[in-house]
Image (cartoon, rainbow, N blue to C red):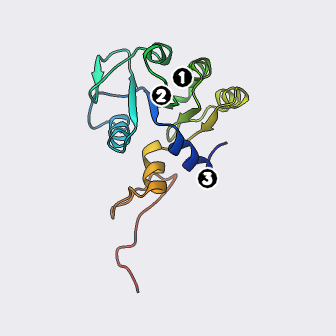
Amino acid sequence: MSSTIHDLRRILGSCKTLAVVGLSPQWHRPSFFAAKYMQEHGYRIVPVNPTAKEILGEKCYPSVTEAAKENSIDLVDCFRRSEDIPPIADEAIAIGAKCLWMQIGVINEAAAAKARAAGLDVVMDRCVKIEHARLFGGLNWAGVNTKVISSRRPQQLFY
């Protein structure tokens, strides 16, 4: 799995256009929050949501395949259930994406193995926003604690 610090830094440093599958138009949803953060940090977001027309000022597409007809996609970021990942992985392979990224709680070993065999980097059970903030300096004093990764700072700094 491409989850070492060096791999994550390389992936996030080279993949600048992200197709976000399952991106919600609702501001309070994790997918919206993560995509907005990435957009604000210089990444191009390509929303994939068959029920929306536009999210974050970008045209929505019903599938990764449709999105790739008008956009060059580097990374496919999945905010879908684990069992929904295999066809998304197939689309990522077919369009020539560099990376298949599955968000926190999303794990599908079969889809990951297929994507890896096709030459894609694969990241599972990690948040693209949290990893970017951790590796490129976007964490604040509040930190995060997802039970997968914690970046909380101590209440008092002892010097």
Q: Residues within 10 Å of mark 3 (few under 14, many from 20)?
A: few
For label 2, count other residues whose C-alpha is less than 10 Å away and answer few (under 14), some (14-19) or many (20+). some
**Residue 103 position in % (x across, y down):** 50, 38
Mark 1–mark 2 distance (CA, rounded to whole Å): 6 Å
Residue 80 marker? 2
Looking at the picture, how far across and down is residue 77, in whole percent? 49, 32
The residue depicted at 43 percent of the width and 56 percent of the height is 145
Q: Between disc 3 and disc 1, whose residue precedes?
A: 3
> Tags 3 and 1 in contact by the CB under 8 Å rule?
no
| Badge 3 amino acid | His
Q: Residue furthest right?
A: 117
Q: Secondary structure at mark 1?
A: helix
Expressed as whole percent of the image width and height from the top left, the position of residue 13 reads 51, 45
The structure residue drawn at horizontal position 67% and vertical position 42%, both measured from the top left corner, is: 1
> Where residue 18 is drawn, which disc sits there?
none
Q: Which residue is mark 3?
A: 6
Residue in the foreground of this view, choosing between 159 and 45: 45
3 or 2: tag closer to the N-terminus: 3
Q: Nearer the viewer, residue 76 or 10?
A: 10
Q: Vertically, is 48 above or below 28?
A: above
Q: Residue at x 59, y 54 (%)?
A: 5
Q: Amino acid at mark 1?
A: Asp
Give the residue type that dot 2 points to.
Arg
- Answer left or right for 97 relative to 18: right
Q: At 54% across and 35% down in the image, what residue appears? A: 101
Q: CA distance from mark 3 to mark 2?
A: 26 Å
Dot 1 and dot 2 residues touching (CB under 8 Å): yes
Instruction: Look at mark 1 in the image and give the residue it sits on.
Output: 84
